[in-house]
Image (cartoon, rainbow, N blue to C red):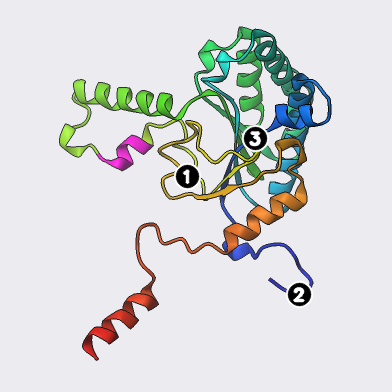
Amino acid sequence: MTATDSSPSSSVRPVHIAVVMDGNGRWAKKRGFSRLEGHRRGVENVRAMVENCVRHEVPYLTLFAFSSENWRRPKKEVAWLMRLLDGALDREVKTLHSNGVRLRFIGDLASLAAGIQKKIHQSCELTRENSTLNLTIALNYGGQWDLVQAFRRVLMAVQQGEICLDNLSAELIAENLSTAQIPNPDLFIRTGGEKRMSNFLLWQLAYTELYFTDTYWPDFDTKEFEMALESFATRERRFGGAEHDAIEMEVEDVHA
C-alpha cells in the first residue's frame, strides 16, 4: 500500500467474498421505520456492494439473500421479501448484464414461485458469458441442505457403480456442492453484530477468513467494505500449515 492509495494491495485482495447481509430490521427500528423498509434499503445496498467488488477487482461475490430458515418469519415479511426479489430481478438484471456481471443462484429454487423461478433462469442465461464479476445469490439456501444434496449425489453414483466408495474424498464432495463451479470464499463478512455462520456455506468456509462488524447492512458502505479488505490484508493464511521462517528458527534452536 502506498501513502497515496488507501485501498488494500491487490496482492492480498480476496478472490471470493461471501456476505451475510444482517441487520436490516434493527437498522429500520433504530430510525423508526418498518422492518419492510429496512429490507428495501438492504436490497438497494446490494448495488453498492457489487460496485465495490468491481472497483476493487474482486471476481467472486456470494450474498446470503434468503435462508431455508427464513420461511419461519411472519408471512407478511416473507411475502414482502419475495416481492423485493421479484422487483430487483426486473430492475437490476439488465444493468448487471451491461456491466459484465454473471448471475448465479444456489439453493432450493424449486420451492419458489414459478414466476420468480422463470426470471432467475432468464437472468442466468442472459449473463452466462459475463466475467467482470461472478455474483452468486444464495436463495432458500442452507449449508446443511447443500451438504445433504451433495451426499445424495455421491451415494447415487456409488449405487450406480459410477464411483467406488473407497474413492470418496473431500474433493468429490466439493464437486457435488452447489458451488462446485466457483472457488471457496477467502473472506466471509457478516454485518449486524452477530458472530455466527447461520448455516451458510458450511463446507466452503472451512479456511475462510471471518470478519464481523456491528454495522447494519444498509449502512455497510464503501468505507466499511474497505475496512474489511484492510483486515483481510493483515491475515496470514496458512491453511493448516505453519509459518516457514518460524519452523526454521525452531529447528535451529533445537540443534544449537
Q: Main secondary structure of the magenta part?
A: helix
Horizontal and vertical percent position of residue 164: 17, 32
- Foreground mark, 2 or 1? 2
Horizontal and vertical percent position of residue 111: 53, 11
**CA distance separating discs 2 and 1:** 32 Å
> As drawn, is 28 to the left or to the right of 23?
right
Q: Quadrant of residue 65?
A: top right
Q: Quadrant of residue 94?
A: top right
Of labels 2 and 1, earlier in sequence is 2
What number is the disc on residue 21?
A: 3
Q: Is 172 within the magenta?
A: yes
As shown in the figure, which amino acid type bears the numbered disc 1?
Asn
Disc 3 on helix, strand or loop? loop
Q: Nearer the viewer, residue 93 or 83?
A: 83
Q: Nearer the viewer, residue 136 or 222?
A: 222
Q: Is 30 within the magenta?
A: no
**CA distance separating discs 1 and 3:** 18 Å
**Residue shown at 59%/62% (left/top)?**
233
View extreme (bottom): residue: 256
Horizontal and vertical percent position of residue 23: 68, 33
Where does label 1 land, which residue? 184
Local packing at callout 2 (Cα closer than 10 Å; few below 14, some 14-19, many 20+) is few
